[in-house]
Amino acid sequence: MAEEKIKEGKEEEVEVISLQTPKGIKDVLPLEQPFWETLKKAVKKTAEFYNFGRLDTPILEYANLFHKAEGVGTDVAEKEMYILKTKGGDVLVLRPEVTPAALRAYFRHGMSRETQPSKLYYFGAIFRHESPQSGRLREFHQVGFEILGGEDDPIYDAQIANLSLRLLEELKIKDLRMELNSLGCRVCRTGYKKKLQHYYSHKLNKVCEDCKRRFTVNPLRLLDCKNAKCAVFKEEAPSIINSLCVVCRGHFRSVLEYLDELSIPYFINPRLVRGLDYYNRTVFEIFSGEGNTALGGGGRYDYLAENLGFRKGIFPAVGSALGAERIIDCLKEQGIAVRPVEKPKIFFIQIGKEAKKKAIALVEEFRRADIRVSEAFGKESLNAQLKLADKEGVVFALIYGQREVFDKSIIIRDMKDGTQESVPVEKIVTEVKKRIK
Ligand code: HAM
C-alpha cells in the first residue's frame, strides 16, 4: 500500500506518536508492581483493622465541587486543576484530591443513616498540574482515610494521625516525624488573620507577587508560600497557637494528650497551614528522616460540608491522605524488601504441531487446579524452551512431544538435577500438585 502511494507520488505524512507519557505522568512496569502490591496490602490490612470501609469515587467530578472546596488563593484551586468541557457542556475535573468527593458521596448516599461516624478509606489516582520534580508528579496516587459525621471529638483527630503513622510503620518505614498545628475555628482565625496582615503589611514590597495577592484575598495562605524569597517572613510570622480561643485550645490539648497516650512523638509547627483551605483546628503532616517532602497530611474540616452547601452548620469531619509514589520512593531509599511477585514453578514445553494443539488445553487443567504454569508457545525447539525454563528458575519442566501425544504420557523433568520421568498425561496435574507441595 505504502509502495503504491510512493509510486503515485502522493505518500501521506505519517504522524509520529511520541513514546513519552505526558510530563509528570508515569507508566508502572511489571518490575515495580511488588512495591504497589505491598502498599495496597498494607493499606487494606490497616484500614480494615480500624474498621474503615473502602470508598471508590469517580476520577471525573464536576469542577465546582473542587473549586469551592479548595478555597481562594490555593495553588490547587488556582493553577493545578485539569478541567475539561464535555460535548454536552458539563465542566468536569480530573480529581485533584478525594476529600470533597468523599463528603459528596457521603451525603449523596445518605450515609448519615448508618452508624456514625462513617469511617472510609480510598486508594486511587489524583491529578494536579504542578511543576514536576522529585516527589511531585502530575498524576499520582493517594491512600486516604476520612472520618465523617458523629461528634467533633479530638479522639478522631488522634485516630486519623495514628492510623496514618501505623500504615507507614506496617510498611517498615523508619524515622517517622509528625508535625502538628491547630488552625482554630472561624472565630479565633479571624483575629489571627488580622495579626498576620498587620505583620505582613510592612513587608509587602519584599514578598512574591502571589503573596501580595494572598495578603488581601486569603492571608492564611501567606504561610503556605513555597517561594524561597518569602521563607524568612514565614519563619518570623506570629504563631496561630497564641490566638486560639479557649475551646480550640482545649481541643488541641486533647489531641496532644491522645497522641501522648499512643506514645506518638510530634513537633508542634505553628506555621503549618497545609496547601488546602478547608481545614479548621488540627492539621498535621508526616515526614521520614530529614526530608521535607511530606509522605502524607491531613486534618479536621468541620466547615467543608456547609461551604459546599451539603448541610447547614458544623459537620464534623477529619481525615488524611498519603502519597503512594512518595511512600514507594521511601521504601526504595530505605532498602525495605518487598515480596516479589510469585513466579510459576512449572514450565510447559511442547514440541511439534500435535503437542502444541493439545498443550493449550492441558495448561487450562493446571489453571483449574490453581497451579501457575509458564510457557513459550511461540517457540518450537526443545533447547530454546529449556533455556527459558532455566532462566525463569522453575522447579519442573513438563515436556510434551509427538511421542508423548502418541503414548498419552508427558515427561516431568526436575530442573535441579535433570532427572526425567514419564507420567500418564491424565495424572500429570495430580502428580505435579504432589511434587510442588
Ligand atoms: P495533600 O497534602 O494535598 O492533602 O496531599 C496528601 C499527600 O499526597 C501529600 O502529603 C503527598 O504525599 C501526596 N502528594 C500531593 N501532591 C503530590 C504530587 N504532586 N505528587 C506526588 N504526591 C503528591 C490532601 O490531598 C487532602 N485531601 C488530605 C486530607 C484528607 N485531608 C483531610 N482528609
Image (cartoon, rainbow, N blue to C red):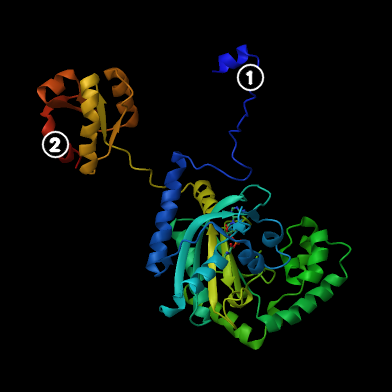
Residue that label 2 marks: 431
Occupied quadrant, residue 245: bottom right
Q: Secondary structure at mark 1?
A: loop
Residue 259 visible in the picture? no
Nearer to us of marks 1 and 2 is 1
User: Closer to the N terminus: mark 1 or mark 2?
Assistant: 1
User: The disc labelled 2 sits on which kind of residue?
Assistant: Glu
Name the spot of residue 221 as percent of width and height, x first.
Answer: 73, 67
Side of 243 relative to 262 (left or right): right
Q: Residue at x 63, y 29 (%)?
A: 15
Query: Which mark, residue 11?
Result: 1
| Residue extending farthest top | 7
Query: Dot 1 surroundings within 10 Å: few (below 14), some, or many (20 or more)?
Result: few
- Which corner quadrant of the figure contains ligand 1? bottom right
Occupied quadrant, residue 228: bottom right
Residue 143 visible in the picture? yes
In the rendered view, would you say 363 is above or below 418?
below
Q: CA distance from mark 1 to mark 2?
A: 60 Å
Name the spot of residue 294 as percent of width and height, x first.
Answer: 60, 58
Q: Quadrant of the N terminus?
A: top right
Occupied quadrant, residue 315: bottom right
Name the spot of residue 12 as percent of width and height, x first.
Answer: 63, 23
Side of 342 relative to 175 (left or right): left
Q: Depth check: 342 or 378 in front?
A: 378
Q: Residue at x 54, y 81 (%)?
A: 254
Q: Secondary structure at mark 2?
A: helix
Side of 102 relative to 385 (left or right): right
